[in-house]
Image: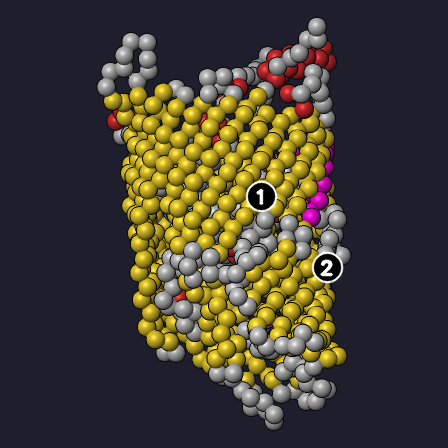
Amino acid sequence: MPTRLTQIAAAVFALCSAAVAHADMEQPKQDEMQKVEIKGSAAKYDARRDDTASKTVVSSEEIQKYGDTSVNDVLKRLPGITIGGAAGRSGGEIRMRGLGAGYTQILINGERAPAGFSIDSLAPDVIERIEVLRAASAEFSTQSIAGTINIVLKKALKPAQHELKLTQSRSSTGSSPAVSLQMSDKNGATSYSFGGNAWRFNYDRTTPSWETGNGADGLPNVARAITWQDIGHGDGFNLSPRINWNLDGGDTLTSQSFLNYNRFASTTHSRTETTLGAGPDYDRIDGTYSNHNGFGRTDLNWVHKLEEGAKLDVKAAVSDARNSSDSLQVGGNNGAPATLVRTVHADSSEQGFSTQGKYSTPLTFGTPPAGTEATEHALSLGWDAGVTQRDDSRVQRDADLPGSSPINSDEGFNAKVTRLALYGQDEWNITPLWSVYTGVRWEGLDTRADGGSIDPVQNRSSVLSPLMQTLIKLPNKKDQVRVALTRTYKPPTTAALIPRKFTSTNNSPTEPDRRGNPNLKPELALGLDASFEHYWGEGGLLSASASVRRIENYTHQGLFFQDQRWVSTAINDGRAETRGIELEAKFPASVLMDHAPKLDLRASVSRNWSRVESVPGPDNRLDQQVPLSATVGIDYKTPDGQLSTGSNFSFRNGGLARLSGTQGGYTSVRRDLDVYALWKLDQQNNLRVAVSNLLAQDYTTESLYSDSNGTLNRTTVANGETQFRVTVETRF
């Protein structure tokens, strides 16, 4: 019979063999001593397997595996998560269950980032872990109809750790160098860590578009070809210092800060050729755009240990975000002198204060019968409050030229958003095989805004969210079942409530003006999640899950024709429903065969459906929901651990989606193939090589409009880009 070593036995064998070999080569010094500690897998905590409230944790090692420079590239490889837009281009929306537009909650250290902050500018090197919560919990905001992704910045403080990374990325349209420095050390009761990242990028892209239309009789009446050239460059940095003090009595005091700065500039050239029908207002538009964006946040966290295992965790934070932009557009028609010279200057600032606190204590009730264990509770009570002050101004000026129709505006507003949440939760271990999580969270928002060009706005909303999750472990200790009942919501953003107008250059049903709606209500959702999980071997997992959400006060962009211009604004419009199933498998090859190579395999597939009652079918999906997504990945490590390599394929389906009775959209399939290799050159130096979007697939989108007068379709193709990336890593 074949002899099979467990991972622990294999580790012991490897350590003993290495020790014998080392003893043969060199006699150890008398004053040196090496301590080796071996822990069994039973002591290893797995949040996904052991927590009653469902949570998947992505470790720092997984986050940094491909040497990504954007957190979006990390997220696209996770089961059930998709990124909108074309591969290799920034700004893609993060989606769970195929849903974006605010249905998926994105947090940094448990809190929302300010308006205007781009998550994909967050460098993976400053992230300690990513938590994916598919069902809501009372501790975090329940603004999470699709789910929550919590990005936790680095906290682990390892003594005397210093690491420097230099990265160079290049694609067919541009390049991007980056540098990362991570440091940490400890001195007595004080420890610190520091993370710093800086990057630059440039690109030169050409994006073609086509507009076609038919009249009421079905005959073609519009045919235009548009070429858009975009040349841009930018740079930015992240800084994340952290200091930790161990106080008397086991208390800790921690100061953590995060600073992000970006600047960007671009030059654009748009040309339109009309072969049928009337041309646009401007068949040539040249422009420049620049933007500066900064965000800073610092918090102080005190953890006080009380008697009998109780704990008080209190945090206070202040933040400041500032953004400014300038743009210039020069437009003309038919080769004549320019009839449009438009400048726009915008400034915004957002200051915030927040405080969170949680009291937690373990409780045991009653005396258990002989031969049974006591019933244990983990009770928590807490609050989450904050106030944000936002100042926003936008000045548009059109030159008064012959043949022009100037549209000048000077719009600004001051907004104050106050929020308060109170919650309680209890994790109850009824038996060793059955635990229940119950929670309730009340959350209220008050938004007030005023400005010279808008009427005063006041919008109040509050939601009471009862929550329940249960985990049942079957007697074989390999299988378990989870069920969750949740009430979640999606409030309107501050920008969506402000009734100011943004003017488009070539106004049309596919390129309308936009304005806010102060009467929006929050969307409310009742959710049910259920899953079955099977664990085997060391690291093997098979899971199947299903979910359903029923949404009231569904919000979408309405389209109106007012004052001879097309205008889009958000409106509440009835009910919607979304359903989904997800299958996932991951396991090392060793669970399938003896003496297997060090291969780790993983795969997942998600299928989503949704229906909006007020929109006629078919294809009346929520927020252009991604109907199907899948991932397949494999990782390999040589026996000596000197070489690691792997590959990941991500698939995201597209298709037609109807947004209203007159509007629709189409997105093409997106396929991402990424590969990487990591060489450990010695104890201090690594070389990492990665290729992203190896297939370089083009990405096509369509904006569709149809009414009794005819149709107008706009098709845009973003060219696929393969990115080659080399990273040199050194520890010192």
Magenta stretch contains residue 306: no
Residue 199's label in the rendered image is none
Type of residue at label 1?
Answer: Arg
Where on the picture, by quarter, is residue 249?
A: top left
Q: Quadrant of the C terminus?
A: top right
Q: Earlier in the sequence, mark 2 or mark 1?
A: 1
Where on the picture, by quarter, is residue 52?
A: top left
Where on the picture, by quarter, is residue 573?
A: bottom left
Image coordinates for residue 688, horizontal then vertical, percent? 70, 40
Label 2 crowd bin: few (<14), some (14–19), many (20+), radius 10 Å: some
Residue 719's label in the rendered image is 2
The residue drawn where x is 57% and y is 56% is 619
The residue drawn where x is 68% and y is 65% is 716
Image coordinates for residue 511, horizontal then vertical, percent? 58, 72
Q: Is residue 128 above or below residue 432?
A: below
**Of marks 2 and 1, the one in the foreground:** 1
- Given residues 711 and 42, the one toward you in this image is 711
Chain part drawn in magenta: 671-684
Tell me which secondary structure the magenta stretch mostly adopts. Answer: strand
Instruction: Find numbered disc 2 in the image and state the secondary structure of the residue it sits on.
Output: loop
Residue picked out by circle 1: 607
Q: Is residue 189 above or below residue 555?
A: above
Instruction: Find numbered disc 1 in the image and state the secondary structure of the residue it sits on.
Output: strand
Does residue 517 appear left or right of residue 23 in this picture?
Answer: left
Type of residue at label 2?
Answer: Asn
Would residue 196 be visible to someone looking at this image?
Answer: no
How far apart marks 2 and 1 lie (CA) works out to 27 Å
Q: Quadrant of the N terminus?
A: top right
Magenta stretch contains residue 672: yes
